[in-house]
Image: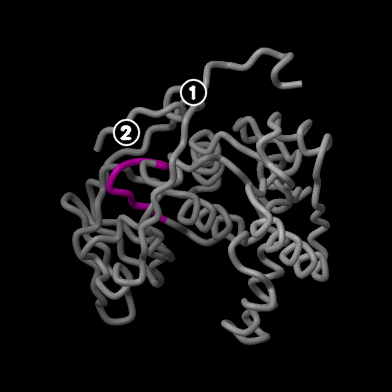
Amino acid sequence: MDKPPSLWAATAVPDGVHPRLSEDVEAEVTIIGAGFTGLRTALKLSEAGISVVVLDAGDVAYGASGRTGGQVNPMLPFNMPDRLRKLLGQTYFERLTETSLASADELFSLINNYQIDCQARQNGWLRVCHNKRALSAARKGVAEWNVHGAGMTVVEGDELHKLAGSTAYGAGVVTPRGGAVQPMSLARGIAAAAEQRGVSIHGRSAVIDLEKDGSKWVAKTAHGSVRSDWVVVATNGYTGDLIPKLSRTILPLTPIQMATDPLPDDVID
């Protein structure tokens, strides 16, 4: 599977070699999908001394992970804490809130610890409001999230103009823990860190069958298989027919991105 052309692919750090799976192997955990979810899980498990094999139909960050906008936003911008509590119940609400609040700090700590070259900048994340209704919702969200320690602020006027570089917006919300990364470089860096800890990553190795064999799981590809105690399916929109029940829970979202020529310093400032 060829990588689609993109700014990220054109400017990313070099990728490692992830050979096609060509034999039958064993591991404690099989991870299907070499995007952020699969790679971060593989690295975390390897830190605990667990053997892991990662399989991907394309290659590292072939899917959404290598095509995201690169924003690191620890909040859930379309969900207010009070609403999440009603939807999830107190226990799962607390888990999700704690995970969300810690996510950006945890990511930048990971990048620092493994010295991942991905243009990482933890300089805050700005979400602008285009009308009074959006501003009202933003103020409500800031008030609710700040109860849980988010530290978000509403900015307007000259301060907003300086941050956004535009006078088109009436207000904005700054999330100080947020920032940005080069997503494909980040994924490749996590993959390299995982491989250094013994994780095997195989590209061009689509899983065509996943079945239980006694107490083990067997993930089969066209040229080999992985036998393991556990399987993590981290394929998101690329799950296909492998697990139909999972595929039916996925809703597509279509973002729009664009890239400019490198901006001069006076524009950036």
Residue at image position (55%, 60%) is 45
What residue is pinned by disc 1?
11
Q: Secondary structure at mark 2?
A: loop
Q: What secondary structure characterizes most of the magenta part?
A: loop
Q: Nearer the viewer, residue 251 or 132?
A: 132
Check if residue 113 falls in the magenta segment.
Answer: no
Kindly give the residue lying farthest to the left in the view shown.
222
What residue is pinned by disc 2?
3
Residue at image position (21%, 55%) is 221
Point out residue 207 in the picture as x, y percentages from the top left corner. Answer: 24, 57
Earlier-in-chain disc, 1 versus 2: 2
Q: Residues within 10 Å of mark 2 (few under 14, many from 20)?
A: few
Give the extent of the magenta segment.
53-61
Left or right: 138 as drawn, with respect to 23: right
Is the Cβ of the residue at disc 1 closer than 8 Å to that at disc 2?
Answer: no
Residue at image position (39%, 72%) is 229
Point out residue 252 in the picture as x, y percentages from the top left corner. Answer: 36, 58
Kindly give the residue lying farthest to the front in the view shown.
132
Left or right: 208 as drawn, with respect to 93: left
| Kind of residue indicated by mark 2 | Lys
Residue at image position (41%, 49%) is 34
| Kind of residue indicated by mark 1 | Thr
